[in-house]
Image: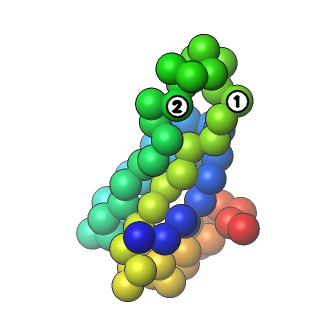
Amino acid sequence: MRQLMRTTDPTRLAFAQALLQGEDIDCFEMDVNMSVLEGSIGILPRRLMVLDRDLDAARKVLLDNGFELD
């Protein structure tokens, strides 16, 4: 799996997941449970991962919808 994006904004992450699911691109959110370590204040970013083969298509979907990616 490859990292598609990293953010501390849960709404951006949810929107990205919805867009990818709408295009039948599987994605997986990592670092969700890190809030236990940080005290739920949202300073540690979460990562959205996709399969290697879906990376280019997933990047295109998010870029077409106004996301800025690394």
User: What kind of residue is marked 2?
Assistant: Met
User: How many marks can you see?
Assistant: 2
Disc 1 residue crowd, few under 14, some 14–19, many 20+, Cα 10 Å: few
Give the residue at mark 2: 34
Q: Residue at x 32, y 69 (%)?
A: 25
Front position among marks 2 and 1: 2
70 lies above or below 13 = below
Question: Residue 21: percent from the left, percent from the top?
Answer: 32, 60
Question: Residue 60: percent from the left, percent from the top?
Answer: 54, 78
Q: Earlier in the sequence, mark 2 or mark 1?
A: 2
63 lies above or below 38 = below
Q: Residue furthest top?
A: 39
- Residue 61 shows in the view: no
Q: Quadrant of residue 38?
A: top right
**SS class, disc 1:** loop
Question: Residue 37: percent from the left, percent from the top?
Answer: 57, 22
65 lies above or below 8 = below
* Quarter of the figure with the C terminus: bottom right
Q: Residue at x 49, y 55 (%)?
A: 48
**SS class, disc 2:** helix
| Scheme by which the image is coloured | rainbow
Q: Give the CA distance from mark 2 to mark 1.
A: 10 Å
Q: Residue furthest left?
A: 24
* Quarter of the figure with the N terminus: bottom left
| Residue 3, label in figure | none
Q: Residue at x 52, y 31 (%)?
A: 34
Q: Residue furthest front?
A: 37
Disc 2 residue crowd, few under 14, some 14–19, many 20+, Cα 10 Å: some
- Residue 67 shows in the view: yes
User: What kind of residue is marked 1?
Assistant: Ile
| Residue 43, label in figure | 1
